[in-house]
Image: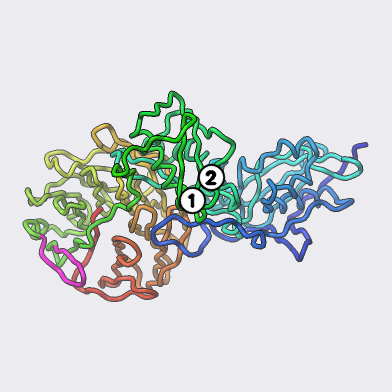
Amino acid sequence: MRRTHRFSLHRWPLAVTVTGALLLSGCASIPTSGPVHQADPPVSSTPDASTEPAVAGPEADMTPEEVVQGFLAAGQGQDDDYAVARQYLTTDLAETWSPYERTVVFSGAAGIQEGLEENQVRVSVDERATIDDHGVMKRREAGSSEEMDVELTEVDGQWRISSVPDGVLVPASNLDDLYQPHNLYFLGKDGKTVVPDPRWFPDRQGVSTSIIRALLNGPAPYLEGSVDSTFPEGTELAGPSVPVQDGTAEVSLDVPDYSAVDVVGNRNMYSQVSLTLLALGNVENVNLSAGGGEADLGADDQSPLSPDPVTVPSRQIGLDGDRLVYLQGGQTQAVDSVSDALVGQAPQNPAMNADMTEFAALVDDGSTLVTFTDAEPEAVERFTGEDLSAPSTDPNGWVWVGTGDGQVRAADAGTAGTQAEDVDAPWLDGRAVRSLKISRDGSRALIVVSDGESAQVLISGVQRDDDGRPQSLNTPYLVDSGEGDLMMGDAAWISETQFVATSVTDGGTAPRLYDISGRYRELPYVDDGVTNVAGGNGEREIFVESGDELRLLTGESWSPQSDQIASTAFAG
């Protein structure tokens, strides 16, 4: 016999009493804070069962509300394929429910209210992010919510859930305990560099399988068309898993139209697989097989794609008055042949390429972009607009700026007689571009946008034509956001996986060191604000300009470097 149970509106803390209270509630912000690795992707180890939240199965004579509460809390217990959570489901649903399909990260407490149908419950949460079955995290803006309907039925006198969407709910406060970010690696359009793509997976045994399945599925949406995958379309795992034994991961692929003699293709596939898996703490070697046999990787002296990061010179460019200078190790030097290129033009924010042969700057108090080279040192006007962002150079020879009315322009630094070209980015929707920096691999743009009330830190894939000409910026990946007293300011890359960005309050500026997954660490506070950020190679080369003084991050403080040199920037 089926009982009817009517529900009234509650705001449930979703607590289950077992070995103390498990509070299923979220913290105030995503990303969560914590240590950020300086170079490599975060290292995952086999999870310690003692670190997982304690969860409990259903007890006798639970009310429907208690069943729903218990199920949601048990979604944090990953052991044995979420065995405890399945105990709250009917037998049929327990066999088909997929907890890996989607993860909702939320803050606050969940609301439970009567559904529209009999024996139905509606659960609502303040949504902070979602993670799909391939580990792609999509952060939500403040005020977003998620609702799901849960249906219950009576089984042998006990309420059980008969219908619930696939996936689990995870409090933001528990995210770092249950999930870890991992970088997948794809091939840059130049065919030489590798580009990291951050994903989030449950921190459990078998994560190697989830990682390789996601890698074979291709890049996240914000990188589509900006990077390449070396795996032919339709490539799948040949077996059910990627086993890791004694430090060696065995990856067996089913590759359509596989050619065993395609050594270059084998090596590129091996590069993607090995670079991605070797970041795991329990993987030291990778064996790749395809077509039923070990993949031929060719001679030992034919190295696969390099995992070495793309670096920039440790020399910065800056302004001494209106003259261009190099700055390195506390010493300055005039920039040969172009030192006086901007004299009398009210210059700011100079930029240069990695070869230190092509240059750009803003003049006329920031309203005009000019470019010049060591061979042709006369500054040439390329674009005029309002509230231009500091120029950024890319490895293809283009100089980028954003505008206060939501435009993005790029100029070919080697073709002085042309105007900057429009780069399509309709998703900007008129928002001001406060900072725009192209990554050192040339595949991504780090962007800070603002609408006056809120600001966001974004990463977008760069779409180019076959000649490397910028065409558009993909709908971006939201890294972080701020409102009111926590507006986001300038940003700068310090590696392919890390960058520095500033959060601005009425009392000063709080720089943050981010990895591309969105995790960050607070850097020392700057009381008198930050007007410029420069990032070189890693944490030891982070500079800020504050109160007409250039300062270097040294441990837990900012060390004064110069009160004469301004608007410094590393190449890029």
Magenta segment, which residues? 325-335
Circles 2 and 1 in contact, beta carbons < 8 Å: yes
Q: Quadrant of residue 13?
A: bottom right
Q: Residue at x 33, y 37 (%)?
A: 298
Whether residue 417 is situated above or below residue 570 in the rendered picture: above
Whether residue 29 is situated above or below residue 114 in the rendered picture: below
Which residue bears the numbered disc 2?
Answer: 135
Q: Amino acid at mark 1?
A: His
Residue 546 percent location from the top left of the image: 30, 70
Whether residue 266 is situated above or below residue 170 in the rendered picture: above
Q: Residue at x 34, y 47 (%)?
A: 445
Q: Could you tell me which secondary element the residue under label 1 belongs to? A: strand
Within 10 Å of the Cα at label 2, are there few (<14), some (14-19), or many (20+) other Cα atoms?
many
Q: Is residue 221 left or right of residue 194?
A: right
Q: Label for residue 516?
A: none
Q: Residue at x 75, y 59 (%)?
A: 15
Which residue bears the numbered disc 1?
Answer: 182
Q: Amino acid at mark 2?
A: Gly
Helix, strand or loop for the magenta stretch, by majority: strand
Q: Foreground: 185 or 148?
A: 185
Magenta stretch holds residue 327:
yes
* Residue furthest out toward the top: 257
